[in-house]
Image (cartoon, grey):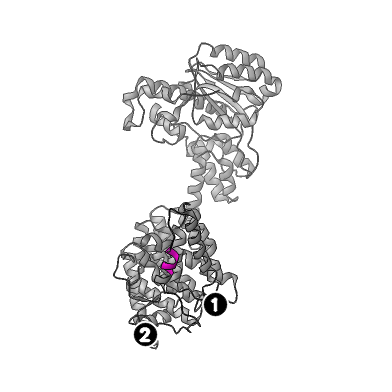
Amino acid sequence: MGIRSTSRTPPIVAGFPSRSFSPTPRIRPSSSPRPTLRRVMRRAEVGASPDNPENMDQRRDIYLHAFSDLSHVSPAMFVYLMKECYICGSLKATPKFKVLQHQVPQALSNSPQPGPAMFVLQCLYILPILGPSYTEGFSHLLISSLRRLLSMDDKQAITPDAKSFAAHLFRDILSGRVSHEERILLKVLEVFQIDIEEIAEAMFGSEVNDASLEMAKSQMGKYISGFIVSRSYITAVALLERFPVYQYCLPSQSLFDKLIEEKQYNVAEKLAIQLGEPMIHLLVKKYVDINMLKRAYIIIKNNDLLQEFSDVYHLYKRSSLKKLARKGLWDIAEIKTNNERQLLEHLIYLAAEAGYLEKVDELCKRHSISCFTPETVLVSCPPTSSYLDAKNFLLDGITWVDDIQGLHGAMMQFRDLRVVGVDCEWKPNYEKGSKPSKVSIMQIASLNRVFIFDLIKLYEEGRQELDHCLRVLFHSSEILKLGYNFQCDIRQLWGSYGDLECFRTYETLLDIQKLFKEPHGGLSGLTKEILGAALNKTRRNSDWEQRPLSQNQVEYAALDAIVLVHIFHRVCSHPQSMEDGSILNKKDWRSHVISRK
């Protein structure tokens, strides 16, 4: 049911709807007559030409002067002046509207008759005449200005007459007699705090009794059902919150099904809270059925239902731990267990399943869990074999470089290469607002071999030699450097070793992810698609500053660099064999090569 799409606007006399459907409050006549709208328009437009800046300024001054005293300004005149202030001048729409946002609240405190609340309501009746391009913005402006005035001035209050008149406006917007957006309908309801008794009086115009109340509730239920059918769920639930007429609307369970089907989860939760605990239970079960465990968990936690849904609570916690483990965020996962033994044992199981036996041992020792050992977990949950095997790629081995002699030896190996893969690792820092850790190691790979540079130690022992050697590599236009999201690595390197020239500029760098149109789940997912098996990322966020690194850490770091070279060669040699058309053509990779000098 679209509020704007309905019938004619009612006849307007001095800003009021006709007496046939809305009572006109008694207004004390002022001592001097108000100018008519036509008279004001004539005065404002005499001698005012858009081509004459002086006349335009004079015209604007007339409008702003009228705002300074509203005691003799009718709502119709005020609406016209607002529009003229908005369209006057050469500024863009936004700054001009900001001027009105400043002027209108002040104007409403300058004696509008018969009071600011009633004055605003009369303006809201008139505004639809201006058309949709003005109605919504000006309506929001007026209501917000009134709300601001009421909050700042204790002497200003909404009178019973204004509240009754607001109920008539609310009714006329609902019925389509006055064309306003649904958001305006809800704002009127919120600011004037209209209740069902006032709605009944506005609808039936007689003394409110049980019969008229029931008819009003029934009519409100029909309107709300119309909003539900037209998928205006936010409006429907907001009205139900104010007028709990559930017995006159669609059945609650049917409404829930509609909200879930349309993915209106926030609205469904708000409705469930209104209806009470049985509906909250129903919503939790629906969330579990569609595997939305996080939303189910939040509802359980916020409504103190842990005892009733302990199984859902643990299901969500285990699911969260699994997601963190897949990302290699083991430290965060451990914190999330809150030292609950059941969750700690599940985290140990996940570590064993990923083949992260040193993490299994670490967790068992730290939390005194003796029923798990590396040997027993290997039997109960052997590590998956779907990951790349380092032995199939590192045919010439891994070389650890932590002294100047080894640095020079490695650079000699790079002289004859045309393509290398580059990657970096650093210790994660989970403390909010703290400085990131220094880059600990850099891996540089050829097709069959990887050199791992201990940057921390090399920097301490000979930063000038380190700078010179890496500058030769990074500044060479003859060697193509491959990375994955390498701009992040460059920023981290620059932040860690900002006094070295080698990380400030570079030549011939290709970010391998630029060769693909669609995301593939990071480097691991891309490796699985191109090379047939994924990278095991369980050690991505391990302690890269410890020395020596574990063998698993070394292999992880080496694979991260060497797969870049293999992916590049596979794409260049077999571009047509890539599935789903996500790979760019062979000739396109050169267009993604970048340099920074």
Where is residue 339 shown, x and y percent of the image?
60, 50
**Place of residue 590 in the rendered image (x, y in percent of width and height, measured from the top left):** 42, 22
Number of labels in the image equals: 2
User: Which residue is labeled 2 in the image?
Assistant: 205
Residue closer to the observer: 480 or 569: 480
Whether residue 11 is visible, yes or no, is yes
Q: The C terminus lies in which quarter of the figure?
A: top right
Q: Residue at x 33, y 69 (%)?
A: 225
* The furthest residue to the left: 7
- Residue assigned mark 1: 157
The residue that appears at 47% across and 76% down in the rendered structure is 118
Q: Residue furthest front?
A: 47
Specify the principal SS of the magenta part: helix
Type of amino acid at the residue the image marks with label 2: Gly
- Secondary structure under tag 1 reads loop
Amino acid under label 1?
Ala
Q: Is residue 478 magenta?
A: no
Give the magenta-colored segment's residue range. Answer: 40-45
Image mark for residue 192: none
